[in-house]
Every structure is written in structure tokens, then in C-alpha cells.
Image (cartoon, grey):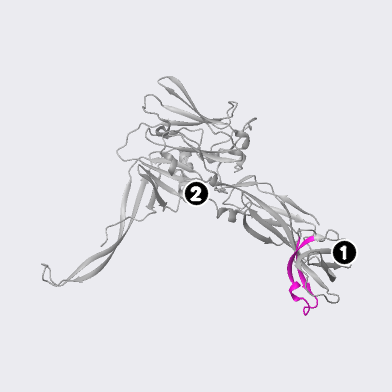
Amino acid sequence: MAMSIVFTPELIAPVNKPMYFNFSSTTSMNPNYKYILLVKDSVANTLGAFKVPPTPYYGMGRYTPHRVLKSIMSDTTDESFYYINTPTWTDLSNGLNRYSIQYGEEYNPLLSWYDTQFLSGGYLGLTFSAPIGSNLLVGDIITLNKDNKTINPTYDGTCSVTQIVNSFTIKTDKTFLNNSNLESGKIIGVQRLVGTTSNFYAYNGTNYNTLTNKQFNNPDNSYSYTKFIIVGGSQPAVLPRFMSNWDYTQPKKIKLDEGDMIQVLLDTTASNSYLQYKSNYNGTPITLTYSVGVITQPTTLSIQVGPKNIGITALNNVDTYTLCMKSSAGVTSSQTYTYKLDNSCSLYNSVRVSFMNSFGHYEYFTFTLDYKESYDINKKEYTKINDGANSQFLGYQSKVFAQDVMVKGLLNSNWISESEYYYLKDLLLSPNAYIVDVNGFIPILITDTNYSLKTNVRDRLFNLQINFKYAIPYLAQNL
């Protein structure tokens, strides 16, 4: 028999969609056939074990481990690193899990033995009337079913093949019991692990089925990791992007006191690559570099890149700055992103929002117009009977003994571009969003359930309103 891998997912794939492995076997038409699949983590621990029946007609084994991997995927929030004033690479490998699939098969081999033997060590041997061939191998787990169950009935059940004694006899790990006349039976099941796939990687992202060219600037709308993985040496025809949905052909506005983060996906060949920051300081070019060091496996890294993080201190010194990755040899290895310092004034307090994008990493955007906050209050009352001795009010008095408060808010952006509107779709679809406060990240839930994409041709000028509620309880005064 022979089992083989027919199809695998991409080396690095989003965990929120199926990531199919297809297997085939020359014995898939045997009775009770099942493909055995063990999902292994980076240190070979078994995350889940599954038996998959063959598909009709073709007899293929088709399995996706994305749900198992999703259960161990960690959030990669930047909260701990956002406020750092010196840009530092942070490993986000908890959002990129390495895994493999150990595969094998289970079926009824239609084998019968006609006698048992006492073998060295006191173990049970089985003798067959026909040569065993490749039907049984050392390490196989077999299920025995004796014909006469009144003699040594404990032989029934599973055991392992520990030795092929000769062409007709195998040794098992069961203990030999009582001698008897001929003891016959059938092997009604064989489980055999055949091999293990190479390593694959899952990141905490998704794959939208209705992507737009404008949003990702990918002519074929593909979500292949090759669009985003940064490598060393020879570069692809289209340079990779950061793990962001921002339209890199447009500058990203940012205020002087704001932080920002970017995330990159690096191949092992990208060891000693570095992020290059370039700007003009009073007309003098400034270049800063931040090396990623040695990369031993595909890795996601995050770094602070906002004016607050880099140390830009005056608007008249720097107007724009650019960021791109460079290989260890100084060759540009990513698209170039441009930040433009926003010195516009507003009558309203700006609210900066952080949200998980479709790659499982975090984006940042500032809402600069009117921010409205409201409180939904649910009060629980009881009636107190006054004794009249110490109160000017006789009779009954209602009092509040507990209250629940839900804080809601409405965010308003300034006029935004069409590409920014597409970019902010991730905010509406994000499972995690935060208001970035001087004291930390405040979790919120976006309550809008509809998002109509707008275009310059149809809508001319437009802004964005976002309704949300706090995802943490408001601590109201209670008795």
C-alpha cells in the first residue's frame, strides 16, 4: 500500500478560512478505511487527532486544521509596545503558529491467523497461513478478534506489532497466556502512521471573498502570503507590502503626538534586514535604520513608527517621512510607505482608534471631528419605609441599590479619501477595537451593522461615522 500527499495549503495561510490538505492511498477502497491525521504544534505536541473517511469515487482524504489552530491562536495587540519612545522590533510569533500534519491510515486488512505462539519475553505471536508481505509492519496498531472467545478472551482488542519474526509470524506487545490447541482469529483493523508533512504556518487573519483591487492593489485580488512576505536576496517583481491594508500609494496622515505601529512578515532569507526611516530635518536629509537581526523561521515583527515613537519634535522640521524595508545588502525589499504630519486644528478632541485588521495585526486611525458620548443607565430600586423619627418625609422612600451603566459613543472622521474609506472597512469588520488613551487601550465594540462603500464619483465628499459601546463595565456608584 502507498499513501501520498496530493495537495497542501500555502506555506503561510490565514487561520480564519479552510486550509485544505488532500491525501490519497492505494488501499482507500478497503473496508472501514479512514485517513488518520494528527495536528502537531511547533514542538510536536498533538493538538488534535482525526479520522477522515475517503471521498466517494476518488477515495481522497480531505482535511483542514484551521479550527484546531484557531483555538490556540493568540491576540497580537500592540498595547504593551505602542507607548515606547524608542522604536524596537517586537516578536509577534504568537500570532504566527507553526504546525505540521502527521498522517496515516486505518482499515480492515482482511487477514486471519490460525495459531498463537509463545515468543521471547513472554509475548504473544500470531502465525498466518499466507505470507504477510507488506500487509503488516513493525509499529502497526492492530485490532484482534478471536474466533473462540472462551479461551484467552483478553487477546481481543488492540496491540502493537513489535517484530516481523518471519514471512508468516509476527510478534505483538500482548502477554502470552495459556497454551491451547489451535487459536485462530481475524485482524479486523490496522492503524499505521506513514509520515509527517513539512512545516506550515498559520496567522490570525482571514480572506475576504470580495476583495477590491483598490483596497489591496493586487491585480488578481489574491491574498497569497507572497504578496506580503519580505525576503532577502533577489526580489520579486512586485515588492511585498507591510501587514496593512493601507493604500501605500497615498500618504498616511498622523499628528505629532501620535504613535503608530507597523508589522512585517519575514522569510528566513531576510535575516539582518532593516527598516529604513528617511525624512528632512530643516532641509537636511535624515536616515535612521532598525535591524531585525537573525531570522530562523518565518516571523512576524512589529515596530513603533509614529512621530511620538521616533522622536519628531517640531512640525516645521519634518513634513513627511518614509519607511521601507531593506535587505542586509541595502536592496529595497518592500513597498515604501509615506507618513505626512497633520498640523490641522480642530474644535474637537481627537480620538485615536486601534483595530485588528484582516491579517490579525493592528491598524491606527484618528477621528478628528465631533465625538459624542452617552450613557444608558439601568437603575434597580427598592422602597424604604421611614420611621418618621429622623426624617422630614414620612412614609415610603424609593432608593437606588444598584445601577448598570453602558457607555456609548459616536466617532466622526474629517473628510476622507476613497482609499481611506475602503481601508476603514476593516474597522467595521474587526473583532477587536480599542480607543487609544493616554492611560492605555480601552476596549470597545463597534455596533454598526451596515457599511456602504462610497466613491468620489458617486458621493463626492464624505466622512465616516462610527457607533460603538465600551466593552468594559462602567463602575457606577452603588449602595
Query: How much space separates mark 1 and mark 2, taking CA atoms?
Result: 56 Å
Magenta segment boundaries in residue numbering: 140-162
From this viewpoint, is residue 110 visible? no
Would you call the spot at circle 1 few (<14 residues within 10 Å), some (14-19), or many (20 or more)?
A: some
Check disc 2 and report its element: helix, strand or loop. loop
Amino acid at dot 2: Asp
Q: Disc 1 marks which residue?
A: 168
Give the side of residue 116 with respect to residue 300, left or right: right
Which amino acid type is shown beneath numbered disc 1?
Answer: Phe
Where is mark 2, residue-wise? 75
**Residue found 38% across the figure and 34% down from its top:** 255
Q: Position of residue 49 (x, y in %)?
A: 65, 59
Front residue (pair 119, 194)? 119
Per the image, label 1 sits on a secondary structure element best described as loop
Q: Is residue 86 above or below residue 172?
A: above
Q: Earlier in the sequence, mark 1 or mark 2?
A: 2
Is 184 magenta? The answer is no
Instruction: Report the quarter where the N terminus lies.
Output: bottom right
| Percent x, y of residue 292 | 54, 34
Is 335 in front, or is 134?
Answer: 134
Q: Is residue 42 left or right of residue 129?
A: left
